[in-house]
């Protein structure tokens, strides 16, 4: 993990107050690179990086050939130009020898600039020396859209932060560890019993806000514009967002109904390394963010904090909480799955206070310098371990089985072995959790011997599979015994198809209602597969509307 003293050794941060160096150290990822490994690729999203050990070369690709056009040594930063211009990296940066770098995300850096404006001026001057004429731009960044006050381990505050992150709302989180918290808030902080408190910059202050209220304050869409839609998409995970992009781009009046925030289960993935087109990986939040922008730009409506109370299968009417009723020519079920919860005494009491299901990138600061545990043996668990290893003192993966190969991709297993602070304990399970205000320790049981070991814990992240939540669907939609939606040939095999034609590949037992992604029986559990199914669903929607819906009730 990065220390405040190491932050002070970086030229850009020389002279910062100890509290500010500590703040930067808490949010900085500690990344170790082997020779030839890229810290960032050309086209990657903006961030600020600095060399602590070794050297990185600046790489430009010309006519398909990588050329070294510069470099950075110990104490030097890179990423100043993307931060200053709000662009992606125009060049790549690759380690030329064993190298250690830190990475600070853009939002975290500009939060510090809000406290220390001269740091932004210094960054702009540095960028100006590289490309000219930019001094002062970084110091004039627009303010965050919201200020949030809440304790570090307050579940309601964690929920607010995740909601804002996943809806692409810039915010500043103020807590007891923030330098000059009263100054950042603009006066005495709210009392603890009122927290979390959110203040929309230039607007209202609300205590204990609901997610619906936050969405309304920030102008996020919560009400449908029309009464009738060609396609109503249920859920804004990868499958739902893909359906929104393709539906809107092909002229269908498309609306997505999301009860929480875009991204779905994939949105809580800290790093997806094998998604096509992202050579250095992409976080679930970032992937969802890009898809959300794309869907909105193409004209899809995205409603957040709205729940579907029921669907009338005969008329394809969609009833929302609050009484709204939408007429749908077709419906796409892309509501995904939810993390399976652990039935251990005391677990629910500490959820949000050190115990989390999934692992959003916003949790990184909470793991800084701590010993954390990850429960699970799938790709999501491996991705989370690699991400948190750059922040936590140690990461322990607890796996009930005797190996990872059956459930985790080989590239992840290989990467886990390169991190000295990642340990994997096989045949292990959590037997108990301890802590009052927050999680402090866990008991780990050896499955074979029954022996129990107590470990100090600064956070536990759970990845033990997921369940379909489809009990709200009408009985006309056929499910398997675990609640997953049957489609295509599985519908006919179950004796739930009444038309003379075969059901389309993603069509449910109700003609005109389709399913895509993890909620569907038998899908490939990959983000790319969900995206593919979301786009395929729109193709089947077109076929259905063209051939069989000439007398639709709308």
Image (spheres, rainbow, N blue to C red):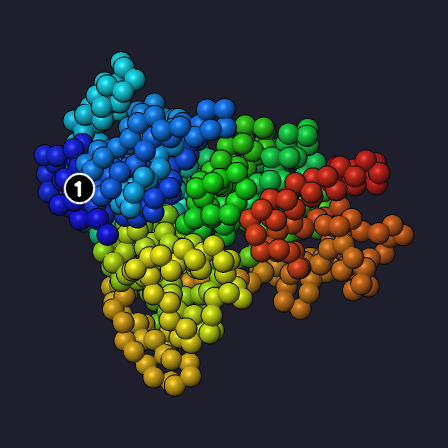
Query: Is residue 506 in view?
Result: yes
Residue 239 or 60: which is nearer the viewer?
A: 60
Residue 552 or 29: which is nearer the viewer?
A: 29
Disc 1 crowd rating (10 Å Cα; few below 14, some 14-19, many 20+) is many
Return the residue found at the far right.
500
Query: Is residue 257 in view?
Result: no
Q: Position of residue 1 (x, y in %)?
A: 24, 52
Label 1 element class = helix
Using the rendered view, name the quadrant where residue 223 is placed.
top right
Q: Give the residue drawn at x 65%, y 40%.
A: 535
Left or right: 495 as drawn, with respect to 25? right
Using the rendered view, name the quadrant where residue 479 is placed.
bottom right
Q: Position of residue 464 (x, y in %)?
A: 48, 65
Residue 159 or 533: which is nearer the viewer?
A: 533
Find disc 1 in the rendering and name its residue.
Answer: 7
Quarter of the C terminus within the rendering: top right
Compared to 454, does 181 lie above or below? above
How many marks on residues? 1
Q: Give the residue drawn at x 35%, y 72%.
A: 346
Return the residue found at the far top.
133
Q: Position of residue 546 (x, y in %)?
A: 81, 35
Residue 179 or 37: which is nearer the viewer?
A: 37
């Amino acid at each position: 993990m990065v220390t405040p003293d190491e932050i002070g050794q970086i030229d850009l941060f020389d002279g910062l107050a100890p509290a500010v160096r500590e703040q930067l150290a808490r949010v900085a990822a500690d990344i170790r690179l082997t020779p030839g490994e890229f810290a960032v690729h050309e086209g990657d999203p903006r961030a600020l990086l600095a060399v602590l050990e070794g050297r990185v070369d600046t790489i430009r690709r010309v006519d398909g050939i990588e050329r070294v056009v510069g470099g950075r040594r110990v104490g030097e930063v890179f990423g100043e130009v993307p931060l200053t211009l709000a662009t992606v990296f125009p060049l790549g940066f690759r380690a030329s020898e064993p190298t250690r770098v830190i990475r600070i995300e853009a939002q975290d850096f500009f939060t510090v600039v809000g406290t220390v404006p001269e740091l932004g001026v210094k960054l702009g001057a540095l960028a100006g020396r590289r490309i000219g004429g930019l001094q002062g731009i970084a110091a004039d960044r627009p303010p965050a859209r919201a200020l949030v006050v809440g304790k570090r381990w307050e579940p309601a505050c964690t929920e607010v932060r995740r909601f804002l992150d996943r809806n692409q709302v810039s915010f500043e989180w103020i807590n007891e560890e923030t330098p000059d918290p009263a100054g950042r808030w603009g006066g005495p902080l709210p009392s603890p019993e009122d927290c979390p408190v959110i203040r929309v910059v230039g607007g209202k202050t609300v205590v204990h806000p609901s997610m619906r209220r936050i969405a309304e304050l920030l102008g996020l869409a919560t009400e449908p514009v029309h009464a009738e839609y060609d396609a109503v998409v249920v859920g804004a995970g990868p499958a739902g967002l893909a359906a929104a992009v393709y539906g809107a781009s092909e002229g269908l009046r498309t609306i997505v109904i999301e009860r929480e925030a875009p991204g779905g289960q994939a949105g809580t993935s800290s790093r997806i390394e094998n998604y096509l087109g992202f050579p250095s990986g992409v976080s679930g939040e970032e992937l969802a963010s890009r898809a959300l922008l794309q869907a909105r730009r193409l004209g899809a409506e995205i409603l957040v904090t709205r729940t579907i109370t029921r669907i009338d299968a005969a008329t394809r009417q969609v009833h929302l909480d609050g009484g709204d009723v939408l007429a749908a020519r077709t419906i796409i079920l892309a509501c995904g799955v939810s993390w399976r919860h652990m039935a251990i005494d005391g677990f629910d009491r500490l959820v949000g206070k050190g115990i989390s299901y999934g692992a959003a990138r916003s949790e990184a600061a909470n793991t800084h310098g701590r010993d954390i545990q990850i429960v699970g043996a799938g790709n999501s668990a491996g991705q989370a371990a690699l991400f948190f290893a750059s922040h936590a003192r140690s990461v322990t993966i607890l796996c009930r089985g005797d190996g990872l190969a059956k459930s985790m991709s080989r590239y992840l297993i290989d990467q886990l072995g390169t991190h000295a602070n990642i340990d994997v304990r096989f045949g292990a399970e959590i037997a108990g959790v301890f802590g009052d205000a927050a999680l402090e320790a866990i008991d780990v049981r050896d499955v074979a011997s029954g022996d129990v070991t107590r470990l100090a814990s600064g956070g536990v992240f759970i990845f033990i599979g997921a369940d379909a939540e489809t009990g709200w669907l009408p009985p006309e939609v056929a499910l398997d015994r675990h609640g997953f939606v049957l489609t295509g040939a599985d519908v006919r095999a179950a004796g739930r198809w009444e038309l003379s034609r075969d059901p389309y590949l993603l069509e449910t037992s109700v003609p005109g209602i389709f399913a895509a992604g993890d909620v569907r029986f038998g899908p490939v559990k990959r983000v790319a597969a969900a995206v593919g199914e979301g786009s395929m669903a729109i193709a089947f929607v077109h076929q259905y509307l063209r051939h069989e819906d000439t007398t639709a009730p709308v």
